[in-house]
Image (cartoon, rainbow, N blue to C red):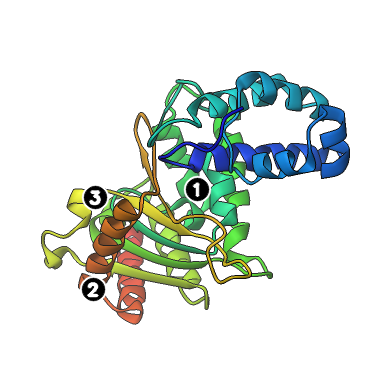
Amino acid sequence: MGEAMPGSTVPRRQLGRHLRELRTDARLTLKLAARKLEWSEAKMWRIESGLTSMRGHDVRTMCGIYGAPEEVTEALVGLARESKARGWWHAYGDTIPEGFDVFSSLEGAASRMSIYRGDVVPGLFQTEEYARITLRAAHPDADEEEVERRVRLRMARQSLVTRVTAPPRLRVVLDEALLRRPVGAGTVMAGQLRHLAEVSKRDNVEIRVVPTDAGAHWGLLTRSFTILRFPQGGEGKETEPPTVYADRYTGDLYLNRPDEIARYDAAFAGMRDTSLSVEASRSLLAELAGTHERG
């Protein structure tokens, strides 16, 4: 097991999160797990905090003690292989199985997110009907059971938005073009846009639309992305470094170098400046919902 390497910390942090969850599910304290592994508690804490890279053999040993399923074990071994990468591009079907959700635990730990979408409505705000259609399109070879499993997972993720304790603050910028693009029947799009208008009334959610007449804007260069920021610790420092996540057709991109974060922050600020106000955006959502419904 080596020390933390320069570059993206995301694979290590995600590996540590999943190992901590497995230990908790196995009803093992940190002290008892350390004793079973014949490691120090300090070493266990560094692993679970994502502060050190790991060998696949050690991950398999931990998963064995925690009773992890084989498919989870293989996914975590894949994460361990990626933990020394200088940056991280997670290609589907590479070292980590496509069905293993790397992003959701990162999303669940965030206290603030800045989201730009120019293609589809963000998963956190999708209606069940809209999610089902977009997931079928994204996974054309999946059977109905697999599509429904993905729909259920997407719907479950949305509890983040409405949770009672410290829900994340969400700033969202959407391109008007995606709101005009039909997805399924007109009633599906109408329901989706009305849902966006309703959820935008929450205190922790801001939804703005970049109008078509804004012309060329940052999103044409960046494409869709999410900037995640994390809670502050006792000294006022973020518990984890900010991270940019961008999902692409053949894989996911994770960035957390300060210069990368700064560029995406600037892009998001630029798009937000050219977007409609929250109130005007909500009115446009209602107007477009009526347009879709009338066909």
Q: Where, by quadrant of the figure, is residue 31 drawn?
A: top right
Q: Which residue is mark 1?
A: 129
Q: What type is the residue that disc 3 sits on? A: Thr
Q: Earlier in the sequence, mark 3 or mark 2?
A: 3
Q: Does residue 151 appear in this view?
A: no
Q: Taking 38 as reference, is 231 left or right?
A: left
Q: Earlier in the sequence, mark 2 or mark 1?
A: 1
- Between circles 1 and 3, the one closer to the viewer is 3
**Mark 2 and mark 1: Cα distance apart in space:** 32 Å
Q: What type is the residue that disc 2 sits on? A: Asp
Q: Which residue is mark 3?
A: 222
Picture layout, residue 33 above or below residue 157: above
Between 199 and 260, the one lying in front of the other is: 260
The percent position of residue 127, horizontal first and vertical second, equals: 50, 54
Q: Taking 249 as reference, is 76 left or right?
A: right
Q: Does residue 42 appear in this view?
A: yes
Q: Which residue is mark 2?
A: 273
